[in-house]
Amino acid sequence: MGGSALIYQEKFQAHLAESFIHLNRLNNAITALEKKYTFLLTPSEFKEMIVHDQDLAFSDQVIYRFSKLQDCMGAKLFKSYLLSQGENVDKPFLDILNQLEKLQILNVDKWFELRDIRNSIAHHYEDDVNVTMGLVNMIYKSRNDLDNILKALQSARTG
């Protein structure tokens, strides 16, 4: 393995590890909330949740870690994976996603749904209690999609 190939492999491993940290912390926060609340959250449960500082902190953690995970994957992980495979990444992001879909790493439409959740966080988070509750519920439903992408990347690289 050449020098640049080794560097790309190391970057990919670092970005994969960072992604799993975000996912694990997101899942830990959801697990903590599940001890008191039933998902998918109802408006009354969410209103109860946000008046308890610790529960609100877990809710914020869910949103923050989802956002960080989605950003890390889109901005770093996908490109570092393709570079570690000797692929060119000097192309539009949609082409990168299509390439990952061909490799059966992800579904492009599903990725854009995840990105829409991330964009909603950036533009609407904390503006409206119902929007925030909806985001937490969407994250709860979609976290397995992120986990599946990470596991597909992990097994594609080691397999």
Image (cartoon, helix red, strand yellow):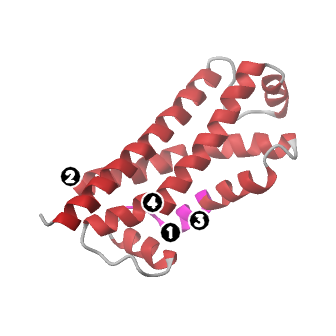
Measuring from the top left, give residue 46's x and y in whole percent: 79, 30
Q: Nearer the viewer, residue 140 or 12?
A: 12
In the picture of the structure, the residue carrying the numbered disc 4 is 76
Type of amino acid under label 4 = Lys
Taking the spot 87% from the left edge, 45% from the top edge, the residue there is 128
Which residue position holds label 2?
Answer: 158
Q: Residues within 10 Å of mark 1 (few under 14, many from 20)?
A: some
Which SS class for mark 3? Answer: helix
2 or 3: tag closer to the N-terminus = 3
- Mark 3 near mark 1, Cβ–Cβ under 8 Å? yes
Instruction: Look at the image and say whether residue 107 sits in the magenta stretch.
Output: yes
Q: Is residue 11 left or right of residue 136?
A: left
Q: Secondary structure at mark 4?
A: helix
Q: Is residue 50 magenta?
A: no
**Could you give the CA–CA distance between mark 3 and mark 1, rounded to whole angstroms?**
6 Å
| Mark 3, other Cα within 10 Å: few <14 / some 14–19 / many ≥20 | few
